[in-house]
Amino acid sequence: PEDGQWLMAAKNYANTRFSGLDEINAANAANLKVAWTFSTGVNRGQEAAPIIVGDTMYVVTPYPNILYALDLKNGGAAKWKYEPQ
């Protein structure tokens, strides 16, 4: 069964890139609204898909490759960030 986790860039080893969650469907998709946004401060396109584990979304920027952990239960607030040297 679908658990809502997205533990790797393509969802799973089969690279399905598909979520089995059914809360969003053709009948209610028109009602979607932005809940929150997060700026990485890097003005180039994102190169990697976010990864979601539990209540945390991990996002990495293009160079300089800063990694952010965002709290999905707290409006996307940054839990921490890692800046490689």
Image: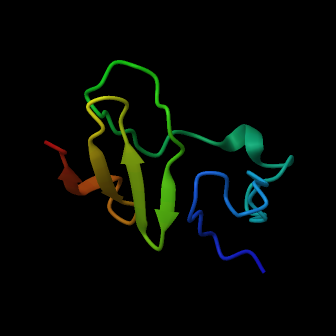
Residue 73 position, x and y percent, is 38, 66
- Tell which of 84 and 53 is nearer to you: 84
**Which quadrant of the rendered structure holds the C terminus?**
top left
Residue 60 position, x and y percent, is 37, 43
Seen as rendered, the residue at the extreme right is: 26
78 lies above or below 32: below
- Is 37 left or right of 10, judged from the image as shown? left
Q: Quadrant of residue 66?
A: top left
Q: Quadrant of residue 12?
A: bottom right
Residue found at x 50% / y 56%: 51
Residue 36 position, x and y percent, is 41, 43
Residue found at x 59% / y 52%: 9
Seen as rendered, the residue at the extreme front is: 85
- Tell which of 76 and 40 is nearer to you: 40
Residue found at x 66% / y 76%: 3
29 lies above or below 52: above
Residue found at x 79% / y 65%: 20
Seen as rendered, the residue at the extreme bottom is: 1
Q: Quadrant of residue 37?
A: top left
- Is 11 left or right of 16, judged from the image as shown? left
